Amino acid sequence: MRTRIQLILALVCALLLLPTGLAAAEQAPAATSEAETLEAGQPATLPADGAFLTLHLGRTQWSHRDPTCTTILPNTITLQRVAEELQSRGLAAVGHVVVDRTSSTWVRQCENRFAYASWNDLARLRDTYGWSFVSAGQSYADMTKLTPEQQWQESCGSLQAFTDHGHTRANGLFAYPNNKYTTEIQSGVVAPCFAYGRAYGNGVNNRAKAAAPHLQSTVSFNGGACNDLTQLCSMNGGRRYALPSEVAARMQPVANQWTAVQFYRFVLGRRNEPTDPGFAWDCTSADVTRHWTSKAEIYCWEDYKLALDAIPSNVIVTDPLSIAQAWGRQ
């Protein structure tokens, strides 16, 4: 009985990937660096040999908060500001959503000093700024420690919440929580429901090599210690701050290629409070090799914009489901 139920559920999820279903799905604007957009309701018609880029935002966290989780930290960038900046460039992002951390009211859920976008926020980002959203799991659980039934609920089962809130492009990609996956889980559980499963790597995906089990490479660019080894900031931990030139290089795919870059949260200026050393950064130097952040998931806002400046005009910035359509993912 269990096997029959799992088979039926897998077949239902597989229907989400059929072209007929895709044609009727909500289409986020397929923005390019030339600010080209689609008319509302029109399906994306992307060339299979296009040069594709996806701008990911991990866990779709709206803002940094103070230790009481009530006040936004100064010199931090909210998702609203990110959306406005991207829209001014004709671009749109793809947010990863943890369902259980997404509030159904205007009061955002806050955990570990990060306020998560609510369903109301996500609707506004979708409808006003053309963003689309994919699943980072029902509860952000380690998929490798779950039973097959729990794995299905964590991944495929999370799609219902997106559908209930009008998001019909979430099946484009499953963002494995903390990159915890196996090829068995991807093939047997996730692939029937999602076009791709995200795996951290160099962020380069070539059309010629796109095949089962349909794992997709995303590079997560991080903050960290500064790159100028003559400075004290170079000793702020083992991870090095990703230079904007490195980020820009990954935002320049060629034909028949899809690159995917991921960030989390952005900051401005300098912060180094002795009473709050865990949230510190310095983005003020004219020399980017002296930029640093105390946490990997924090990055300097102006450096991110420098990388965006380098996106070539022929690159199509879009979401995973549009690429699945263009590349004939079945």
Image (cartoon, rainbow, N blue to C red):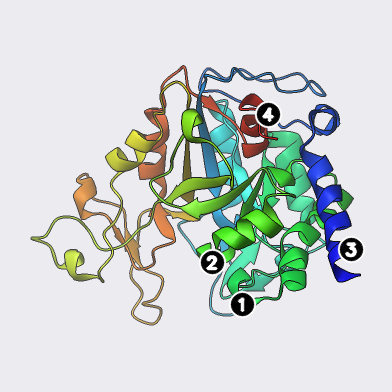
Q: Tell me which corner region of the image, top left, top right, bottom left or bottom right, holds residue 267.
A: bottom left
Q: Nearer the viewer, mark 3 or mark 1?
A: 3
Is residue 122 positioned above or below 109 on the image? above
Q: Residue beneath label 4, please?
A: 325
Disc 4 marks a residue whose amino acid type is Gln
Q: Residue beneath label 3, please?
A: 5
Q: Residue beneath label 1, please?
A: 145
Q: Nearer the viewer, mark 4 or mark 3?
A: 3
Residue 100 position within the rendered picture, expressed as x and y whole percent measured from the top left: 74, 68
Disc 2 marks a residue whose amino acid type is Lys
10 Å neighbourhood of mark 4: few (<14), some, or many (≥20)?
many
Which of marks 4 and 1 precedes in the sequence? Answer: 1
The residue located at (26%, 59%) in the rendering is: 240
Point out which mark residue 180 bears.
2
Which of marks 3 and 2 precedes in the sequence? Answer: 3
Q: Are the two marked residues, 4 and 3, in contact with CB atoms closer than 8 angstroms?
A: no
Q: Are the two marked residues, 1 and 2, in contact with CB atoms closer than 8 angstroms?
A: yes
10 Å neighbourhood of mark 1: few (<14), some, or many (≥20)?
few
Disc 3 marks a residue whose amino acid type is Ile
